[in-house]
Amino acid sequence: MDKIVVTGNGPLQGQIPIAGAKNACLTLMPATLLSDEPLTLTNAPRLSDIRTMSTLLQSLGAEVSSLNEGRVLALSSHGLDNHTADYDIVRKMRASILVLGPMLAREGRAIVSLPGGCAIGARPVDLHLKALEAMGAELELRDGYVHAEARGGLKGAVVEFPIVSVGATENALMAATLAKGTTVLKNPAREPEIVDLARCLQAMGAQIEGAGTDQITVEGVDRLHGATHPVVIDRIELGTYMLAPAIAGGSVELPGGRIDLVGAFVEKLRATGVTVTETPDGLKVARDGDGIRAVDVVTEPFPGFPTDLQAQMMALLCTAGGVSVLEERIFENRFMHAPELIRMGARIDVHGGTATVTGVDRLKGAPVMATDLRASVSLILAGLAAEGDTVVSRVYHLDRGYERVEDKLSAVGAKIERVPDDD
Ligand code: UD1
């Protein structure tokens, strides 16, 4: 497995293009299961999670071709010949559960292994299952698999989510497009990836209103047709690379960046003293020689501050002037980057879901290891301004969600390379 070596070497300058959103693409791909006509996704990111979803869909009998060097995915589910999403694939990626709703809606049955994914808390799937049950699915948990059946098809229902869940909203939304009658999703997730999924489903002929608001109404249709859909840009990749010049200094342009996708994050970034401006084709982030001010951060569902940027924001706050308090409200156990940042000289106290970060002048490079995707990249960001070498191992987490991070960062002047790990 490879390692990434980052050596702090001063301000960054240039452009970092932003890819299509991993989390949008991972829910758009299973939407192919809803139709026997082709679905084409453009602006797809080239990531190992996308390859895992392709393998999963292929195992169900769908055809997936990767065109234009992986930027375009051509999917077709005209002949599904298997209804079981096997543990061997599902355990690699939690988003695999997203095949459940569409497969059940179109085929009337599905067997899906309970998922694995990043080790950030218990992460159950009860809300996904309750929503599908409300639509008339009969579910049974056996041997680590969800066995789902909807003889005669799913039926429209009112589903009220007790807490906001992105994945459960996506599963329910996809399932509802082919259910008989009207489905009302109350307290759904409002993330941009939900809006993107709704747009794609609408292009396939689905009747959906209210995506991006606190209530989504879906009028079921008999069948969906083919469509071509561009994947929305990755707001988490965007926020991550906005933090690079914030941490290392300099000025970086992010073509394709949109402030409406990262509003709460930009507000906090500006509060630290970093300049964020809109340009004709994206965003520009600059930090002059001044120090970073401490800020408090609370993670919340969209439009709040995203949990997926909490680790990266912490990397910035490690060298802020003063004390910052970060409260993680979405996932328990999502501070696994804190002990690693401490190895680099950061002062962080974690108590339950709260991390208190006392800024230090400068971090020092160290060998570090990351146990989830966003934690990995936070260590790389921290390394950009640390003294000496930061060696991040276990980078397979990183490759799940960031396209060649070392190429994008070295293009703006960072000293970063990928080396084979001999351990
Ligand atoms: C998605 C994102 C992930 C992001 C998260 C929150 C994808 C592929 N992943 O994950 O990057 O961090 O949204 O923005 O899009 N919960 C339950 N029962 C359920 C489902 C969720 O209790 O059935 C809880 C979770 O444990 C968590 C909270 O709800 O505490 C939110 O999770 P959810 O929004 O479902 O996250 P994911 O869809 O898994």
Image: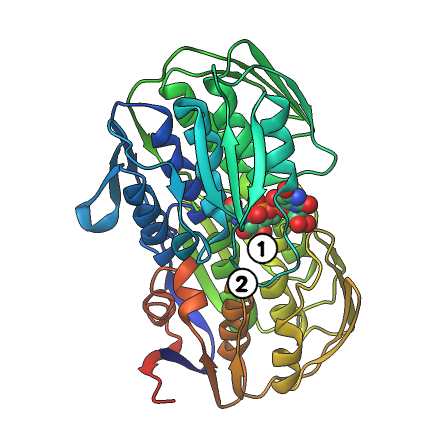
At which x and y percent is residue 225? 31, 18
When the figure is inspected, residue 109 is found, relative to residue 386, above or below; the finding is above
**Residue 191: quadrant of the picture:** top right
The quadrant in which the N terminus is found is: bottom left
Q: Is mark 2 within 8 Å of ligand 1?
A: yes
The answer to whether 280 appears left or right of 59 in the picture is right
Q: N-terminal of the two: label 2 or label 1?
A: 1
- Percent of width and height locating residue 239: 53, 55
> Mark 2 sits on what residue?
374
- Identify the mark at residue 224; answer none if there is no mark: none
Numbered disc 2: secondary structure: helix
Q: Residue at x 65, y 41 (%)?
A: 126
Decide which of 96, 405 is in the foreground and name it.
96
x, y (%) of residue 304?
68, 44
The kind of secondary structure element at disc 1 is helix
Disc 2: CA contacts within 10 A as few (<14), some (14-19) or many (>=20):
many
Query: Does mark 1 have its CB less than 8 Å from ligand 1?
Result: yes
**Whether residue 241 is visible:** yes
Left or right relative to 296: residue 23: left
Residue picked out by circle 1: 308
**Does residue 416 show up?**
no
Q: Amino acid at mark 1?
A: Asp
Task: For the residues labelled 2 and 1, say whether their Cβ atoms are less than 8 Å apart.
Answer: yes
Instruction: Please tell me how crowded label 1 is: few (under 14), some (14-19), or many (20+) other residues with Cα within 10 Å.
Output: some
